[in-house]
Amino acid sequence: MKTTYVLKLSTTMIILVLFASCKQKELPVYNLGETDLTQENLIPFPRSVEATNDGFALDPFTGIYTFSDEASEFEAIGLFLSKKIASKTGLTLPVNDREVERTDRIINIVQKDSISLSGDEAYELHIGRDTITLAATAPQGAFRGVQTLRQLIPEAGIDTLAEFPIWRIPTGRISDVPNFEYRGSMLDVARHFFSVEDVKKYLDLLAYYKINYLHLHLTDDQGWRIEIKSWPKLTEIGGSTEVGGEAGGYFTQEDYKDIVDYAARLYITIVPEVDMPGHTNAASASYAFLNGAEKPAKLYEGTRVGFSTFDTRKDTVYQFIDDVVREISDISPGPYFHIGGDESHVTKKDDYRYFVSRVEKIVQKYGKRMIGWDEVATADIDSTSIAQFWASLDNAKLAEQKGMQVILSPASKSYLDMKYDTLSEYGLAWAAYIPVDSAYIWTPETYSGIPRNQILGVEAPLWSETISNIEELEYLAFPRMIGYSELSWTDETNRDWEKFKVRLANQAAFLERMNVKYYPSPRIDWVKDDFPEKQKVKD
Ligand code: TNX
């Protein structure tokens, strides 16, 4: 099986090489000038970059070819690249089409058994004058490498003597692998609801910066946003409002599956969160027994926290949670289920600990690993569960002592809902003002004192008390989210604010083309002049 594949692969390679070399004589000669791959505006910055100072001319006679065992996944990645090249340059590059009349240059996306760096997300990119080869052991790696290649294609083509422009890609070699396994963002769709389309747009942007997890905060006091078929009132009643009294909304299970599938095609895993035992007013407004009351709680449209709780000593509450975890787990292929667990100020300490241990068992019964906000570490839970450090270093230390892994989301450094400064719009300021530099200048590896091998990664949460539409979401998330991508992907030796700042300034063209209403931080000298209005093709 393996030998046939290798044979097939090398025969095709030989044919392609022959093909490319007979065409060599006819290649149009471009004066591409000198390039320097090491100075490109790549974010997150790769593990190693070597320049060979020449140029690959992306033009209408470039073909994309994919080689792998799992033909369909690699081919889908080739098609994804072709689509992105089309929306950026207007070029339509064929994928695995051996019938095309003329191919001057090729982009190969190849699955290999091993490359110089190991890991599913590792990749190697060799850019020569006429051939680009992207190699990875797994589709995840190929997909991450495609993002690097997208970033290397200039916004504007260069005019040539031919009747079409060419897009010059600097030649050289890149080998790359992520520093942290978990690189995430969180979106609160509970305080204000965001549509499937909004979430997809956010996912597109995250994927470009190699983020691999999107945590959805699906329930809170102000709204229950995911259909649970066995408990229909959760969305009928609990999903009907949001902060400020607007009509809320919710994802049907079909909507949610659509998001999960869309994310999967971007190699992003969705982490569903049902926040409990606190932050549960919307659930108790739908079913009174959940907090042990006679009458259902009133729907809540304000922004206070810490006033609601489930009745932790009632078995029916756990039957309810079993249904919720089962239904959501069934449509969540990822390994994690987030149970919230934060700010349960009106739950007695013992009740809280009893609750968390019991819910952990339910999560495990449905084959998931439990994640909880750092407070869950105060309960008797096992080392396979994960604590998300947001506020309490003591809780994070408890998690460490229990042998648990920790996700870093320190509020004063990584909360996307904190204001940039006193003048910026939207957001809160209870943890800090977080300007773009302060969001980037900290060291996740040493920040909490937790040993590196117990840090799963970094996540930047976006709470939505003060934002209610995609533009406001974008204002708070960008550009800071781009910094978190580098903080979690790039190793410490390759991170430097002064250098990052320049690469960030050059993201403006991409953000504008994607129609992202980012916060134009005055601390960044945004580079805005190289994208003519006519090139603003929506992705
Ligand atoms: C704290 S962070 C919360 C959220 C709020 C957020 C606002 C966390 C686990 N709990 O309920 O939305 O602050 O910044």
Image (cartoon, rainbow, N blue to C red):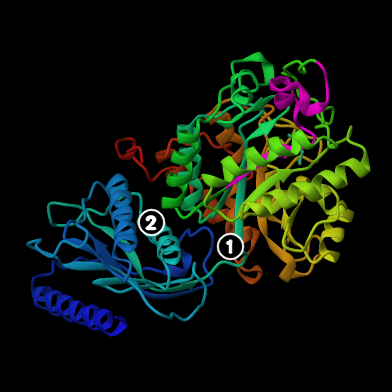
- Judged from the image, the secondary structure of the residue bearing numbered disc 2 is helix
Tell whether position 272 is magenta.
Answer: yes
Residue 150's disc is 2
Q: Residue at x 81, y 29 (%)?
A: 305
Above or below, 434 against 457 in this view is above
Q: Is mark 2 within 8 Å of ligand 1?
A: no
Residue 229 versus residue 285: which sits nearer the camera?
A: 229
Task: Identify whether 325 is placed above or below 178.
Answer: above
Can residue 480 be seen here? The reply is no
Image quarter where the C terminus lies is top left
* Discs 2/1, front: 1
**Residue at 32% in and 55% down:** 81
Amino acid type, label 1: Trp
Residue visible at 85% across and 37% down in the picture: 313
The quarter of the image holding the N terminus is: bottom left
Residue 382: say if magenta. no
Quick check: 468 left or right of 536?
right
Q: Which mark is residue 21?
A: none
Quadrant containing ligand 1 reads: top right
Whether residue 466 is situated above or below residue 200 in the rendered picture:
above
Position in image of residue 501 (x %, y %): 59, 54
Please give the label number shown on residue 489.
1
Q: Is residue 163 left or right of residue 389?
A: left
Look at the picture and state if 124 lies above or below 371.
below
In percent of width and height, residue 439 lies at 69, 49
Instruction: Report whether 227 appears left or right of 49.
Output: right
Amino acid type at circle 2 is: Arg
Q: Would residue 131 be seen by someone viewing this image from the given angle?
A: yes
Looking at this view, is 96 or 21 the one in front?
Answer: 96
Span colored in magenta: 271-294
Q: Earlier in the sequence, mark 2 or mark 1?
A: 2
